[in-house]
Image (cartoon, rainbow, N blue to C red):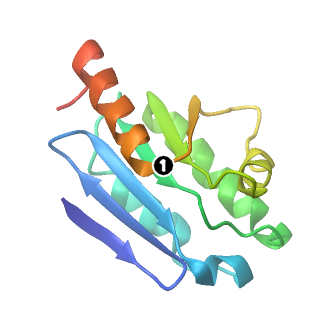
């Protein structure tokens, strides 16, 4: 595993051997009004994986008020789709509106997303998917 970014708002890690990116939001993301390194951090992570990669995305903390960040999030989503993502496994807390906030980011180039309630289930799902499809590096 290689850490690409460890910022107050998020962490971005890549496992090239599994052709997988791990993304996690932190508490600071709730109040973020700008993310100056967000796109370049994602570009660096995407350079470490091959088409057919998967993303494990811990979205238990999201920015529900970051309307100003919407264009940035959507631009990164397009980069992810263009790079050839197979699946994004998003983890959300039951009963919180985190999924509604992330759904607002999705554009017409929507990423293939599966939703989970905990990291363990999402990780197991991605492991099994990669075994079935042979998409790990």
Residue that appears at 29% across and 24% down:
128
Tell me: residue 12, above or below residue 89. below
Confirm whether residue 35 shows in the render: no
Q: Nearer the viewer, residue 16 or 131?
A: 131
For label 1, the SS is loop
Label 1 Cα crowd, 10 Å radius (few <14 / some 14-19 / many 20+):
some
Say which quadrant the C terminus sits in: top left
Q: Nearer the viewer, residue 24 or 125?
A: 125
Residue that appears at 43% across and 40% down:
122
Q: Quadrant of residue 34?
A: bottom right
Tell me: residue 17, above or below residue 114. below
Residue that appears at 61% across and 51% down:
92
> How far across and how far down the image is residue 28, in percent?
61, 84
Q: Is residue 126 left or right of residue 108?
A: left
> How far across and how far down the image is residue 126, in percent?
35, 32
Q: Quadrant of residue 61?
A: bottom right
> How far across and how far down the image is residue 36, in percent?
58, 80
Q: Is residue 26 left or right of residue 1?
A: right
Residue that appears at 59% across and 80% down:
27
Residue designated by label 1: 118
């Amino acid at each position: 595993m290689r850490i690409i970014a460890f910022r107050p708002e998020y962490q971005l890690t890549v496992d090239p051997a599994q052709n997988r990116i791990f993304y996690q939001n932190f508490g600071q993301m709730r109040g973020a009004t700008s993310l100056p390194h967000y796109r370049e951090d994602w570009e660096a992570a995407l350079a470490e994986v091959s088409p057919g990669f998967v993303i494990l995305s811990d979205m238990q903390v999201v920015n529900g008020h970051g309307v100003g960040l919407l264009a940035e999030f959507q631009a990164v989503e397009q980069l992810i789709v263009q790079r050839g993502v197979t699946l994004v496994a998003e983890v959300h807390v039951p009963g919180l509106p985190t999924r509604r906030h992330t759904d607002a980011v999705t554009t017409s180039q929507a990423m293939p997303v599966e939703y989970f309630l905990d990291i363990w289930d999402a990780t197991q799902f991605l492991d099994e998917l990669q075994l079935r499809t042979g998409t790990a590096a």
